[in-house]
Amino acid sequence: MCAPELRVAVIAPSERRGQSEGRGQGRGRGEVLSPLVQPVLRQLGLWPTFLAQGFAPSHRTLTSWDQAGLTSSELLLEARGPSWRVDRRAFDGWLTAAGCRAAERVDAKVCHLAREADGWSVVCDDGNSHSARLIIDATGRARALADRQGSRAKAQDRLIAAYAEATTSGPAAPELLVEAFEDGWWYTMALDQGRRAFACMTDADLARGLRLNTPDGWRRALARTQFVSALASKIIRLEPPRLIPAGSRYAATTAGFHFLCAGDAASAFDPISGHGVVKAMRSGVFAAYAASDCLARGDAAALDRYGAWVAREAAAYATTLSEHYGSVSRWPERPFWRRRRADAPSRNPSSSLLEQ
């Protein structure tokens, strides 16, 4: 007997409509995807079209972590290929469009969910209602659907990014540069057309004390770095910095009655991991497998298996993250590093989370 055909719909505002509603302002543009993105995109059949987008490969990362000097991590011999510097908004737009080619797209926002006997009733802001046998919340850190059902995510830290873009003079160093300082860490990377992204990563309470949401406070914190501030000396014009939530979070319940959380809605990783996007995509793949097993094969345990997989991944990530932050010993009494210190073996900065 053949399994019943599944009809998939993606409910999401169009890019134009999202921009008119302020969508896309919640994150910075500059992002580096780890080499692990290649096997995931190949599995999805999207690798050739990803290459056609013109995103720039990144063959090394420069790091100043537990030592004052600068370490270069080369990826030229990495079997999985280089990392990739992407405009996150452009990448998200491309990936959404690619996904919607295999599904019906509903240009709307969900405004109400109600559980029914065999699924869900979905009411959208365009006035239309839909019935769904299973729902996947893939709304990122917003968790726009899961939070309405009372499924809250637990914050594991208060990390925040003070993000700003700048126009710089002269040739731009293309590498991702990560530099620890006494109250957190900075990263910077080249964007396009002479523009560069800068972000100061620290805890929310420390960001308030440093006044990182103001140009003066942001520049004062920048001046406490050595290598990032050298690149910042070429700034011609700086946009006002803005604060973006970036902390680790994990949803205690990622699967419920015909309901799954995928991507950052299930668990959100610290940007130092370099795996946030790849993790989210892989989570989406496994969520799709679980949904298919549940609906097409009648496997009632499929959703619970998916939830257990998310929990195992989050636990392994938390251990590795603790070890990585615990390797920094330069500022043992500063609040940011004291909060993250753990009894963990030292790690070589060149083998950091950024390259795993």
Image (cartoon, helix red, strand yellow):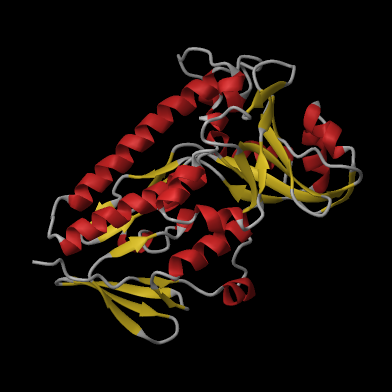
| Res 299 seen here | yes
| Res 26 seen here | no
Q: Which residue of the protein is positioned furthest toward the front in this rendering?
A: 48
Q: Is residue 345 left or right of residue 20?
A: left
Q: Which residue of the protein is positioned furthest toward the bottom in this rendering?
A: 127
Residue 219 screen position, x and y as percent: 82, 40
- Count of marks, rendered view: 0
Q: Is residue 205 left or right of residue 164?
A: left
Q: In this view of the protein, which residue sits in the foreground, 95 or 314?
A: 95
Task: Assign the N terminus to one quadrant of the image.
Answer: bottom left
Q: Residue at x 32, y 50 (%)?
A: 286
Residue 71 screen position, x and y as percent: 70, 20
Q: Which residue of the protein is positioned furthest toward the left in this rendering?
A: 1
Q: In this view of the protein, which residue sits in the foreground, 330 or 32?
A: 32
Q: Residue at x 25, y 66 (%)?
A: 134
Q: Is residue 282 above or below residue 4?
A: above
Q: Residue at x 40, y 70 (%)?
A: 10
Q: Residue at x 57, y 32 (%)?
A: 354
